[in-house]
Image: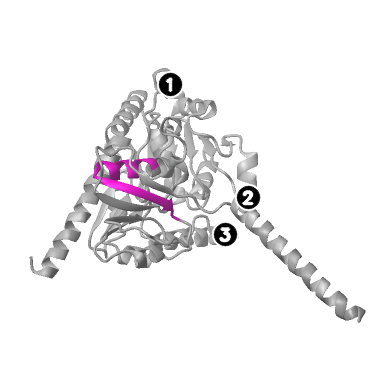
């Protein structure tokens, strides 16, 4: 009898406990780890009441603060996230914005235009769009398969040179194949080198990245003679991807100063522990905030910003340094046109990087000043948010027009 009485009590207790755990789980999910936020009906820059609606899958957080409180000192991803909705508003679209790396969105509105990034949720959203919607893939880099191949080669070469097999730096793990193949057009950051990686796609438009205007005037008091010996490596994540291994090995055999501003991974630090710790002319700072006193001090000290990246759209960190008058020393894979101000790394080998750096450090003071000013002039002309907006709007409109012409030809109009 006792057993029959106690069993229901136990079941009720367990049921209550499970119910409490589920409630706690929902609280943790929704409060401690809230679902991705979205911004709906974004129309801050609309001239009137737009008749068209766009869906943007990119970044939400940069637009969450009030307009006058948003960070205006950055560009690259965080700045682009602010500029794309503005450009779409100016083209006459109300914009709904969702996070590019979250899934599970159920669309309840009709969209005239969809701009997506990455391969996480693009396919899910694509399936929910009406056939007449214009679909644009926005890429901040080169074709995803090519990017993975180039990084894999760098890791393989490093393993052959030093015996360390490091983990991938910036591998693209979600396929972007359907996102790129099923889009009406692709807009990517970079010059023709970037667009050429999409050579098998019918409509690809490259546009420049940008930096917000720099008010720093340190170039006026820079010691360009001393600065010839100082090279700044200022970069986002990815030690091997960005070519830090090659640059470090190249500088070991010189008396030139290399200033490293990047987060160093544990495995990279193990592979290069001697070079990063024992050589007095190789200076490691870790991540340095752009436009901070430390950054400005390094920009004042160095004449050059150097990278040996294997694959980019256009590195925003480099453009930021160019906006401070640092002369870029870059490979073709950075996809920045250097014209007559920058120094081209014709190949990313240790010997060539060393040779180029040594030759560059012998440049005359007057030539350094000239190239620094040309770099500043180029950034102020070709790498501004306003230029980005104009280029993006022209690219979007070109793809929309091509979509319309294609539809008209199918209907015999």
Tag in front: 2 or 3: 2
Residue that mark 3 sits on: 167
> Is the residue 279 above or below the residue 31 in the image?
above
**Closest to the observer, 366 or 49:** 49
**Closest to the observer, 79 or 45:** 45
Which mark is first along the chain, 3 or 2? 2
Mark 3: give few (<14), some (14-19) or many (20+) Cα within 10 Å.
Answer: few
Q: Which quadrant: the N terminus?
A: bottom right
State how the image is colored.
one colour
> Is the residue 326 above or below the residue 269 in the image?
above
Which mark is first along the chain, 2 or 1? 2
Q: CA distance from mark 1 to mark 3?
A: 39 Å
Q: Which mark is residue 218?
A: 1
> Is the residue 27 above or below the residue 152 in the image?
above
- Across and down, in percent, residue 142 comes to 36, 56
Range of residues picked out in magenta: 82-100
Residue that mark 2 sits on: 32
Mark 2: give few (<14), some (14-19) or many (20+) Cα within 10 Å.
Answer: few
Q: CA distance from mark 1 to mark 2?
A: 44 Å
Which mark is first along the chain, 3 or 1? 3
Query: What residue occupies the far top of the structure in this picture?
Result: 221
Residue 89 in magenta stretch:
yes
């Amino acid at each position: 009898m006792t057993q029959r009485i106690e069993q229901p009590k136990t079941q009720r207790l367990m049921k209550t406990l499970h119910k409490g755990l589920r409630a706690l789980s929902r609280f943790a999910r929704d409060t401690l780890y809230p679902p991705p936020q979205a911004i709906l009906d974004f129309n801050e820059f609309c001239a009137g009441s737009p008749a068209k609606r766009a869906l943007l899958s990119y970044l939400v957080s940069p637009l969450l603060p009030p307009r006058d409180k948003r960070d205006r000192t950055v560009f690259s991803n965080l700045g682009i996230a602010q500029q794309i909705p503005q450009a779409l508003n100016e083209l006459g679209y109300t914009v709904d914005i969702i996070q590019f790396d979250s899934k599970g969105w159920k669309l309840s509105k009709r969209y005239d235009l969809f701009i997506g990034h990455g391969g996480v949720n693009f396919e899910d959203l694509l399936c929910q769009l009406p056939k007449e919607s214009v679909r644009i893939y926005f890429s901040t880099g080169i074709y995803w398969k090519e990017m993975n191949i180039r990084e894999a080669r760098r890791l393989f070469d490093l393993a052959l040179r030093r015996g360390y097999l490091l983990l991938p730096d910036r591998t693209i793990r979600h396929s972007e194949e359907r996102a790129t193949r099923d889009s009406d057009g692709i807009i990517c950051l970079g010059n023709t080198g970037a667009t050429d990686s999409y050579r098998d796609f019918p409509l690809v438009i490259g546009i420049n990245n940008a930096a917000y205007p720099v008010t720093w005037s340190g170039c006026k008091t820079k010691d360009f003679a001393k600065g010839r010996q100082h090279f700044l490596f200022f970069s986002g994540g990815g030690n091997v991807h960005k070519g830090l291994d090659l640059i470090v090995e190249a500088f070991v055999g010189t008396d030139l100063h290399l200033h490293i501003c990047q987060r160093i991974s544990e495995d990279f630090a193990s592979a290069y522990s001697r070079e990063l710790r024992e050589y007095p002319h190789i200076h490691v700072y870790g991540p340095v905030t752009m436009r901070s006193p430390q950054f400005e001090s390094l920009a004042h000290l160095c004449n050059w910003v150097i990278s040996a990246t294997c694959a980019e759209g256009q590195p925003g960190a480099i453009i930021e340094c160019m906006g401070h008058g640092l002369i870029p020393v870059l490979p073709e894979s950075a996809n920045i046109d250097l014209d007559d101000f920058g120094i081209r790394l014709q190949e990313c080998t240790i010997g060539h990087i060393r040779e180029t750096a040594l030759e560059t450090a012998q440049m005359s003071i007057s030539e350094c000043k000239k190239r620094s000013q040309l770099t500043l002039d180029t950034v102020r002309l070709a790498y501004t948010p306003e230029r980005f907006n104009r280029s993006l709007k022209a690219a979007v409109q070109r793809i929309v027009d091509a979509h319309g012409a294609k539809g008209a030809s199918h209907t015999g109009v």
